[in-house]
Image (cartoon, rainbow, N blue to C red):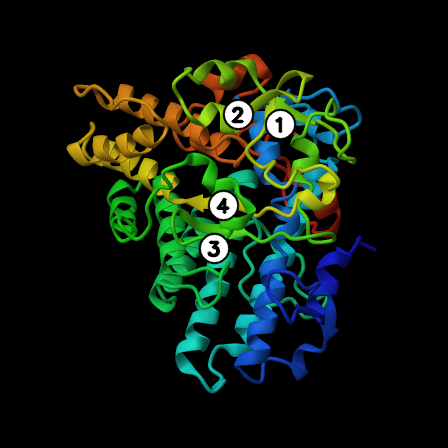
């Protein structure tokens, strides 16, 4: 008898709910048929869906692991035994726990959203506007989940209805195009249903949906559609004057530069990111491993006048040398007497306004076969905040794209952007061949062995 993915089956018969969106543990269980009777219950069910983002973006999640494969992070001194080391030289395989967890965790989120939508759509919960927003948030989350899956694994089984039994689990892989079309449908409907201002801090809104939709369209090289979505975002946020303000606990869920963040708090809600990024040479803080550090090539991209360098990187603290450049930007909570596990309560940025600006520059460059005045204006806004001079005009399309991607590399260190930036521009092999990247194989992760065992209809990706 085939192996059953019990994580998925547990998610089928339960939902997570919490009294407080940001801090409370949402792991109380209720029967689906007795829930979603009103706005309050639907909101609690939605909180449960949001909490399924936590394992997706934590220390061994898609953000840091893809940056390990890209030219951003490399193995730090405390990485012994961590499976993340296999992502630096592309020696991971279908048995990887990281690969399996990423695949499973996204489908747990998807099934949670599917359950909510199946119970709310077509039912009157007593507040049409709030119900529409809740359903829009659910579609945003499902769009984000499938967007991650299709970029990591290619075509995957496409489920838009809740799985309520063991029947129908042998769903074959949809094509990449089919998955992308569903993502675009979800995010377009989310844009139409969501308010511009979040119902609560930390929840998705129309600005987040438009920004993510733009990223999807940019990935598909649908430049006009990306530009259109980003023009709906321009001016709705601004850049902090100080780059460091993006990474302060007191500024979580701000309406200045933040667009969408994954919510973390004290244990067990912490992300573990700080533990994995903090060098093991630091003493007195506890539970720090130094798994990831900055690649030398990345360090060399920062000029002395780039104010992001001191915020992003550090190689010593109070006279303790680290033996390399490590990532500083998430260390706001690292203070004497506080363990890194608790300091790791800082939220993880998925979308920032700087991302929207640099995507806008990239999309305009692609749409017009070269940069426009608005494209220069967008990238220069980011550069000026970093203390850099505006770009010299006259760049052609190729040189401008290269400049935008390099700016993104400096701006989004350890934010899980670089791998996908290279992939959408077909630059993975050109930039990563010397790290062991194999063209025709490593553009995708393998389908996990556990998924193949559970679903005989699945086919493995090339080369695994």
Residue under label 1, please give it: 463
- At mark 1, the secondary structure is loop
Q: Label 1 vs label 3: CA separation?
A: 28 Å
Q: Position of residue 453 (x, y in %)?
A: 75, 47
Q: Earlier in the sequence, mark 2 or mark 1?
A: 2
Do tag 2 and tag 1 residues touch (Cβ < 8 Å)? Answer: yes
| Image position of 399 (left or right of 165) | left
Q: Quadrant of residue 396?
A: top left
Residue under label 3, please give it: 143
Residue under label 4, please give it: 350
Which label lies toward us, 1 or 4? 4
Q: Label 4 vs label 2: CA separation?
A: 28 Å
Decide: is 264 above or below 244: below
Q: Label 3 vs label 4: CA separation?
A: 13 Å
Q: Quadrant of the N terminus?
A: bottom right
Q: Nearer the viewer, residue 68 or 432?
A: 68
The reply to whether residue 165 is visible in this rendering is yes
Q: Label 1 vs label 4: CA separation?
A: 30 Å
Q: Earlier in the sequence, mark 4 or mark 2?
A: 4
């Amino acid at each position: 008898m085939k192996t059953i993915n019990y994580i998925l089956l547990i998610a089928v018969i339960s939902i997570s709910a919490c009294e407080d969106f940001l801090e409370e543990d949402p792991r109380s269980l209720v029967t689906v048929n007795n829930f979603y009777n009103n706005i309050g219950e639907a909101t609690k069910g939605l909180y449960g869906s949001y909490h399924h983002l936590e394992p997706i973006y934590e220390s061994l999640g898609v953000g840091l692991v893809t940056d390990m494969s890209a030219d951003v992070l490399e193995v730090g001194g405390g990485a012994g035994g961590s499976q993340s080391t296999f992502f630096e030289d592309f020696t991971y395989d279908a048995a990887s726990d990281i690969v399996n967890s990423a695949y499973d965790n996204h489908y747990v989120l998807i099934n949670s959203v599917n359950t909510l939508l199946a119970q709310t759509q077509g039912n009157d919960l007593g507040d049409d506007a709030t119900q529409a927003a809740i359903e829009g948030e659910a579609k945003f989350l499902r769009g984000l989940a499938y967007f991650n899956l299709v970029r990591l694994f290619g075509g995957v089984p496409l489920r838009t209805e809740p799985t309520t039994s063991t029947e129908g689990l042998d769903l074959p892989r949809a094509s990449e195009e089919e998955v992308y079309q569903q993502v675009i449908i979800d995010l377009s409907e989310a844009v139409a249903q969501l308010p511009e201002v979040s119902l609560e801090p930390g929840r998705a809104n129309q600005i987040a949906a438009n920004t993510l939709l733009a990223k999807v369209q940019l990935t598909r090289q649908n430049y006009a559609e990306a530009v259109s979505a980003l023009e709906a975002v321009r001016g709705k946020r601004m850049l902090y004057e100080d780059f460091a303000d993006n990474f302060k606990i007191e500024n979580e869920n701000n309406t200045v530069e933040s667009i969408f963040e994954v919510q973390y708090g004290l244990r067990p809600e912490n992300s573990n990111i700080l533990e994995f990024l903090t060098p093991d040479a630091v003493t007195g803080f506890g539970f720090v491993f130094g798994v990831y550090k900055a690649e030398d090539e990345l360090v060399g991209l920062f000029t002395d006048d780039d104010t992001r360098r001191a915020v992003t990187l550090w190689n010593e603290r109070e006279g303790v040398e680290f033996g390399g450049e490590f990532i500083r930007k998430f260390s706001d909570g690292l203070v004497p007497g506080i363990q890194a596990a608790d300091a790791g309560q800082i939220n993880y940025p998925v979308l920032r306004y700087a991302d929207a600006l640099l995507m806008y520059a990239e999309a305009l460059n692609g749409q017009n076969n070269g940069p426009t005045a608005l494209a220069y204006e967008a990238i220069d806004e980011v550069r000026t905040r970093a203390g850099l001079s505006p770009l010299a005009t006259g760049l052609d399309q190729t040189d401008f794209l290269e400049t935008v991607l390099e700016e993104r590399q400096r701006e989004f260190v350890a934010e899980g952007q670089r791998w996908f930036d290279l992939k959408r521009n077909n630059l993975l092999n050109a930039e990563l061949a010397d790290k062991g990247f194999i063209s025709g194989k490593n553009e995708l992760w393998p389908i996990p062995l556990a998924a193949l065992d559970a679903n005989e209809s699945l086919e493995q990706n090339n080369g695994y």
